[in-house]
Amino acid sequence: MHLPKPGRASLFACAALAACVFLCSCTYFAGGKVGNASVPEPAKPVDLARYTGKWFEFARYENRFERGCDAVTAEYAVRDDGLISVRNSCRADGRERVSDGRAKVVAGTRGAKLKVSFFGPFFVGNYWVLDHADDYSWSIVGEPSGRFLWVLTRVARPAPSEAQALYQRVQGLGYDVSMLRRTAQ
């Protein structure tokens, strides 16, 4: 059997597919490590009725989809179909950027793990509420690879003592606090 030589478009498509497979495998099979430790499991159940509402991003691990963003907020609400609506907004380059998505609670996780999508059913990410205050005044959110981390608060600018306590809790979970980027609110 004689096969024709692949054209540039075919080679580009194969290279793009290989890159996509590599990046997806890095996202989902990154070993679940934070420094030298494993990514922690969520510490306690999450009452979604209390978790919903507006959160301010206090700090994060820098990531490409929030590059240049400040004044970051996230708003969650329970939808009629049982899913959670997600609205993330930030200010970048003098303009407001908004991303709307939806989340589904992972069964058997006591509300602490969600699957979140901003781009339809083909691009789903993990959202783990690793810890939160008993009064839901703060939460620490991550995912299994350990590459993403967010520290959220109910107020735009927490008191210095609370900020210090949050850094200590993040460190106690095994994350490198030197990688946290404090969000200007």
Image: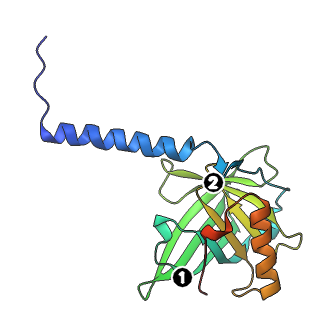
- Indicate the quadrant containing the N terminus: top left, top right, bottom left or bottom right: top left
Q: Secondary structure at mark 1?
A: strand
Q: Disc 2 designates what residue?
A: 146
Q: Residue at x 19, y 37 (%)?
A: 10
Q: Which numbered circle lies on residue 151?
A: none
Q: Residue at x 78, y 87 (%)?
A: 160
Q: Mark 1 or mark 2, which has the lower sequence index?
A: 1
- Indicate the quadrant containing the C terminus: top left, top right, bottom left or bottom right: bottom right
Horizontally, residue 93 falls left or right of residue 50, namely left
What percent of the width, then of the height, locates residue 41?
Answer: 77, 50
Amino acid tagged 1 = Asp
Horizontally, residue 70 falls left or right of residue 141, namely left
What percent of the width, then of the height, locates residue 133?
Answer: 85, 70
Mark 2 Cα shell of 10 Å, populated few (<14), some (14-19), many (≥20):
many
- Could you say which is closer to the camera, residue 51 or residue 164? 164
Mark 1 Cα shell of 10 Å, populated few (<14), some (14-19), many (≥20):
many
Q: Residue at x 69, y 76 (%)?
A: 55
Q: Which numbered circle lies on residue 70?
A: 1
Q: Secondary structure at mark 2?
A: loop
Horizontally, residue 7 falls left or right of residue 178, namely left
Amino acid tagged 2 = Gly
- Number of marks: 2
- Image quadrant where residue 148 sits: bottom right
Would you place residue 34 above or below residue 58 in this image?
Answer: above
- Could you say which is closer to the camera, residue 131 or residue 53? 131
What percent of the width, then of the height, locates residue 47?
Answer: 83, 62
What percent of the width, then of the height, locates residue 149?
Answer: 64, 63
**Cα–Cα gap, marks 1 and 2:** 22 Å
Colour mapping:
rainbow
- Could you say which is closer to the camera, residue 19 or residue 172? 172
Would you place residue 124 above or below residue 58 in this image?
Answer: above
